[in-house]
Amino acid sequence: MARVKPKRQGIHIDMTPMSDLAWLLLTFFILTTQFKTKETVTIDPPSSISQIKIKDHGVMRISMTKDGKYYFSMDEEKYRIPLLEAIGKKYNIEFTQKEKNEFKKINDFGVPIQNLKEYLNASENVRERMNVPGIPGDSLNPQITDWVFEARKIAKDSNDSLDLGIRGDVKTQYPKFKNLMNRLQDKNMNKFQLITASESKPE
């Protein structure tokens, strides 16, 4: 008598837990992703084959445009308001709470401290149309290095540190860069990192 073969059952996999996990991951990434804010100025840095990468956090930057204007930015939002207060105290300028909150939100800026209140009170659309003069950085008015010095001091008081990155446009004239080095050395700040565009290493 022939042996009766049992009916083969198809394999069934319940995909409900997997779809739930996918939605949880998607929700997590949407809620935790921080989008990079729009930069005020466009810089085209020179290229290099350096493999040293600048940190993602704990960095402040000085940017130099091709026409020699200085801009300042700082990643750590928690230090932005204390920094504004310290600079305001140094230059005898008092900022309102609204101006402080606005300063905390901006990514970078390039205006003298005397024009910063007007800049912070302007709408985003008006700022984009402003003729930004850049932060002064000459020997008689070295505001750009004051921002760096005060930021490092605030971080140090919190047992923290801020690295300095300098990003210059490929068309920036050397005297502007040399002037910045001189102003930093005036305040005994000799440690910084040049930010360049990556270039493939020759074989």
Image (tube, rainbow, N blue to C red):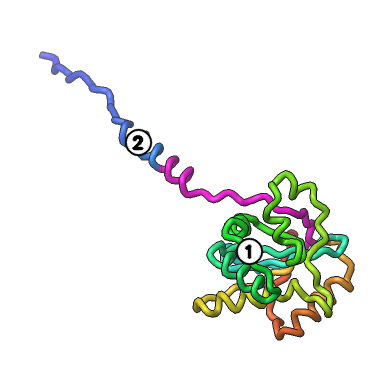
Residue closer to the observer: 125 or 21: 125
Position above or below: 184 against 196? below
Residue depicted at x 61% and y 51% = 36
Looking at the rendered structure, the kind of residue marked 2 is Asp
Query: Percent from the top left, x then y, of residue 154?
Result: 57, 75
Residue for badge 1: 95
- Labels 2 and 1: the sequence-earlier one: 2
Mark 2 nearby-residue class (10 Å; few <14, some 14–19, many ≥20) = few
Looking at the image, the residue that sits furthest to the top is 1
State the CA–CA distance, disc 2 to disc 1: 49 Å
Does dot 2 land on a helix, a strand or a loop?
helix
Question: What's the mark number on residue 8?
Answer: none
Main secondary structure of the magenta stretch: loop
Q: Quadrant of residue 133?
A: bottom right
Mark 1 nearby-residue class (10 Å; few <14, some 14–19, many ≥20) = some
Residue depicted at x 56% and y 62% = 77
Does dot 1 land on a helix, a strand or a loop?
loop
Residue closer to the observer: 183 or 112: 112
Query: Percent from the top left, x then y, of residue 124?
Result: 69, 47
Q: Is residue 33 visible?
A: yes
Residue depicted at x 14% and y 16% = 4
Query: Percent from the top left, x then y, of residue 186?
Result: 76, 85
Q: Is residue 26 magenta?
A: yes
Residue closer to the observer: 18 or 109: 109
Residue range in magenta is 25-47
Question: What's the mark number on residue 20?
Answer: 2
Q: Quadrant of residue 111?
A: bottom right
